[in-house]
């Protein structure tokens, strides 16, 4: 007998049944893992199916209006450096009070663009700013084309929001493009009900009122101080124009900027985006109340547009008004100033706001006021434009407001 055989005789013989028990345990573990994997796969398929069904339902609620054939003599878009094209998005808030719950502030009728905001998004998606266009500003409205192909005659020194009243979104886009030379890539309209629903979908939006509002005429009652408003009170807040703002529509426009900036802050916060119920609720509210252009005809395209803001810091999202002044023959009307031309030039060249243009701007990092700032905020704009003014990088956004700026904020109904 050789050595190998001798060694083998020293090994203990396996106990009967031990191999069978080990085999049974392995089979049990394999069965458990199969169940887990199958369960996860089913869950993934079920989730994907639920999301797909939800998206289909939301897509079916979208109202899309193709206005391409109604636009004439459109400006060309300048080529700029960047991984993507810069975007110019026109947001129109309609004052139609025909919808249920929309007849607020004691007024009726409507049909114009109560709020008009031009949003410019840079090609690198790291800078964005919204420009409010006063509805009472007098402009030379060009000819527009109606849906049936007939021509809507233009008018000199017409109020800006008459473009929407006369020819809807198409005439507003036509008017803005002809006046500014800025090509509008997308447009969105939202009514009062949609505004209320979207505010409620994100759990309310924070604002700060410098004083109490108790107006029995319009039935608007709001407390002073910092607070979170639900959709109904938020609509009252952005519509109020007799107590908070001595300058009426101008102050209301600034409060609308602050409110939108605060809503942006809320929507992009981790607490909102990690709550699927709120995200779905927000999308559901949006799709039920928006009218979109043909290039934004599905939820996936809307989501893709929203995801492009992932590289945009809150402090890099700003809101300003087009430079304007009072119209001398009628102090109740406004006109754009020559500074507005510099703004349109910067938008066409995809430049950030110059120091002059961003004076008094509201940014999404600190929309309510106070001393808290976004710790990730950049110290300033990194790419100033050589065309009209020096770079904004020398002037940080977190400078304390001056006494003049504080007084202006209070006049606009904002906390300084």
Image: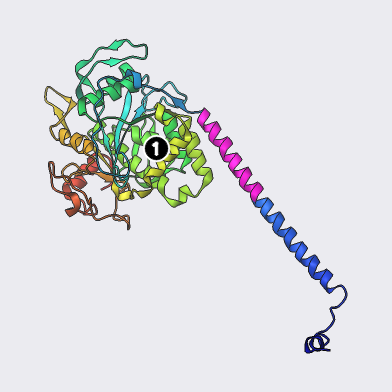
Question: Residue 210, percent across and down?
Answer: 29, 44
Q: Is residue 365 visible?
A: no
**Residue at the spot 44% in from the left edge and 43% down from the top edge:** 204
Left of 89 or right of it: where is 179?
left
Left of 301 or right of it: where is 363?
left
Q: Is residue 56 magenta?
A: yes
User: Residue 158's quadrant in the figure?
Assistant: top left
- The one of 47 and 339 positioned closer to us in this rendering: 47
Question: Residue pushed farthest top?
Answer: 150
Left of 325 or right of it: where is 48?
right
Q: Would you name the residue on which mark 1 appears?
A: 234
Q: Quadrant of the N terminus?
A: bottom right
Q: Is residue 99 magenta?
A: no
- The one of 372 and 354 positioned closer to us in this rendering: 354
Query: In the image, is residue 271 above or below residue 342?
Result: below
- The one of 317 and 383 positioned closer to us in this rendering: 383
Element assignment for label 1: helix
Question: Residue 82, percent across and down?
Answer: 28, 44
Q: What residue span does the magenta drawing correspond to?
A: 41-60
| Pointer 1 local density, CA inside 10 Å: few below 14, some 14–19, many at least 20 | many
User: Residue 378's quadrant in the figure?
Assistant: bottom left
Question: Residue 356, percent across and down?
Answer: 15, 43
Question: Residue pushed farthest right?
Answer: 16
């Amino acid at each position: 007998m050789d050595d190998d055989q001798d060694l083998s005789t020293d090994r203990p013989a396996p106990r009967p049944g031990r191999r069978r028990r080990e085999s049974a345990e392995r089979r049990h573990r394999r069965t458990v893992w199969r169940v887990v994997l199958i369960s996860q796969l089913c869950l993934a398929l079920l989730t994907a199916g639920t999301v797909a069904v939800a998206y289909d339902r939301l897509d079916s609620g979208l109202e899309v209006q193709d206005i391409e054939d109604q636009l004439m003599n459109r400006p060309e878009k300048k080529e700029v450096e960047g991984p993507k094209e810069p975007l110019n998005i026109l947001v129109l808030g309609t004052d139609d009070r025909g919808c249920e719950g929309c007849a607020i502030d004691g007024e009726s009728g409507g049909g114009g663009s109560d709020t008009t905001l031009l949003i410019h998004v840079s090609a690198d998606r790291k800078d964005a700013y919204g420009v409010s266009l006063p509805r009472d500003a007098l402009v030379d409205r060009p000819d527009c084309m109606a849906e049936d192909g007939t021509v809507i005659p233009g008018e000199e020194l017409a109020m800006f929001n008459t473009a929407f009243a006369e020819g809807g979104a198409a005439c507003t886009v036509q008017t803005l493009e002809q006046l500014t030379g800025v090509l509008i890539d997308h447009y969105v309209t939202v009514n009062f009900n949609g505004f209320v629903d979207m505010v409620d979908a994100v759990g309310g939006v924070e604002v700060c009122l410098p004083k109490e509002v108790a107006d029995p005429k319009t039935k608007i009652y709001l407390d002073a101080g910092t607070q979170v408003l639900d959709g109904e009170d938020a609509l009252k807040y952005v519509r109020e124009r007799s107590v908070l703002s001595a300058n009426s529509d101008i102050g209301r426009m600034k409060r609308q900027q602050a409110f939108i900036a605060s809503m942006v802050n809320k929507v992009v916060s981790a607490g909102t985006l990690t709550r699927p119920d709120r995200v779905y609720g927000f999308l559901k509210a949006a799709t039920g109340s928006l009218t979109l252009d043909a290039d934004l005809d599905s939820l996936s395209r809307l989501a893709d547009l929203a995801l492009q803001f992932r590289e945009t810091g809150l402090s890099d999202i700003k809101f300003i008004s087009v430079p304007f002044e009072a119209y001398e023959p009628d102090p109740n009307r406004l006109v754009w100033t020559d500074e507005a031309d510099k703004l349109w030039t910067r938008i066409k060249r995809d430049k950030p706001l110059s120091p002059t243009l961003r004076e008094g701007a509201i940014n999404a990092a600190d929309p309510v006021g106070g001393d808290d700032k976004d710790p990730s905020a950049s110290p300033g704009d990194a790419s100033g434009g050589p065309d009209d003014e020096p770079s904004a990088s020398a002037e940080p956004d977190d400078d304390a407001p001056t006494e003049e700026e504080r007084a202006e904020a209070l006049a606009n109904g904002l906390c300084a």
